Image (spheres, helix red, strand yellow):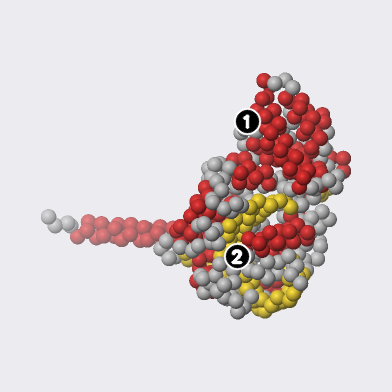
Amino acid sequence: MTIPRLLAATLLLAAGSAAHAQADKTTTTVEKKSEDTPKLPPLPADKSITQTAQIGGRTISYKATVGTITVRDDKGKEIGQVVYTAYTVPGRDPARPVTFAFNGGPGAASVYLNLGAVGPKRVQFGAQGNAPSDSPIARDNANSWLDFTDLVFIDPVGTGFSRSLVDEAETKKAFYANDPDIHYLSKVVYDWLVKEGRLRSPKYVMGESYGGYRAPRIAYELQSQIGVGVNGLIMVSPYLDPASGDGATALSPLPWMIDLPSMAAANLERQGRLTPTAMAEVEAYTRGDFARDLLRGRSDPEATGRVVTRVTELTGLDPALVRRLGGRVDSGTYLREIHRADNTIGSVYDSNVTAFDPFPWSAQQQSNDPILDALIAPTTSAMVDFVTREVGWKTDARYNALSYAVNKAWDRGKPDDTPVTDLRKAIANDPKMRVLIVHGWDDLSCPFMASRLIVDQMPAFGVAERVQLRVYAGGHMFYSRSDSGAQFKADAERLYR
């Protein structure tokens, strides 16, 4: 049947109009998607300079490099750029070890391990008396590890100068969750080894705080999926058990057992009586009578009284407060009350590092952590000065030493998502792998007692102290104290050699 010409023309016009409208709609959608995708200027090419530092009593000449590694999705699309800082001593490949270092957060750049702990230069932060206005001048770090290993400090996407190249939803899916974080960062380690021709070098992975969650998982991912063996792990104030924090469960005594020894250590330090012997007594009480009396509860009317008396003695808190809490002192209450008479508040990272409480009469803490607020300025200024002025890696991008936005966006998975499973498998799979876990006595953000209990539940793996635990004076960033940093270096050097 023939369609009348006018009707055909009308239908053709309607079809054309519909197609045009659809094209406009498609164009609008594409433009909107394009608007959501970050439009960022390119990062500079990799840049290296030669520097020297006095380390271990001698002058070390090394190459400092600021560079970028591309992150791609499964289809090869560039979705992110990871910026790293590497310090390498020339002429010693392939026998010279290389250590990959990560900080935590999530949302922290690697600047804290770099300029605070093991890098060739150091900026003072994280101890009592340090202030944001202190001059951010980096000086030679006598406790640097560069005299026995090359160092690569990696900033995950969203920290440092590292960045995502996709929209917000894709960024969260690709970068801001436990498992994707491990997958792409492991690939970054592999890519650096290939790029620098270092696959034959002994390899170590180091992580602080949430970086301590990353380290064993990255090691097992490298070992079992990517095909790169790891000689050792160094876990600094690691976040090993997400389910063991304050109030994690109404039944288990573990949250109180984990926090009490660090509170006792801080009290002993204030009295000038902090020693390994004194802390061994604290640990014995915590694992013995304290745990038993907590579990007895009201079935033993005298149990609470015993707990209150001993906890008051160990912490130095007001007896009436401890009695009101039934001997179960959470870290937030401790940090607020132990320095109440001075109108100061303690840091969860080192309870003996304090700042004035801007709202001392408030029932709740209304200020940020004293250490976190004090270290952003010196670390950021020192790192940006080093990268842009000294190395000459010029960029106008913002440097994020600590990104609260990344932390807020992070998908933390299930509460029982622990790296200890991967740690056990990695050790069991490689009989030559060694592990060093280190803590500060006063740390309440990642208390040493959690690691003590976890390590004691692990098998021996055939050799005494395959997994070593060491605790030093100080808090989360114990290395800010030179003597603790020196002890840490000595323990690590034995692990490497």
Percent position of residue 295, x then y? 65, 28
Query: For the point 77% across and 41% down, which residue is it?
Result: 264
Q: Amino acid at mark 1?
A: Ala
Q: Which mark is residue 250?
A: 1
The N terminus: image quadrant: bottom left
Foreground mark, 2 or 1, reads 2
Query: For the point 51% across and 70% down, which residue is it?
Result: 199
Query: For the point 70% across and 62% down, which residue is it?
Result: 489
Q: Which mark is residue 99?
A: 2
The C terminus: image quadrant: bottom right
**In the figure, is residue 223 to the left or right of 370?**
left
Percent position of residue 436, x then y? 63, 55
Q: Residues within 10 Å of mark 1 (few under 14, many from 20)?
A: few
**In the figure, is residue 471 to the left or right of 272?**
left
For residue 367, above or below residue 97: above
Badge 2 vs badge 1, beta-carbon distance below 8 Å: no
Q: Residue furthest left?
A: 1
Percent position of residue 251, x then y? 61, 30
Q: Amino acid at mark 2?
A: Thr
Which quarter of the picture shows residue 74?
bottom left
Badge 1 marks a residue whose secondary structure is loop
Which quarter of the picture shows residue 159?
bottom right
Badge 2 marks a residue whose secondary structure is strand
For residue 349, above or below residue 41: above
Tell me if residue 319 can be seen. yes
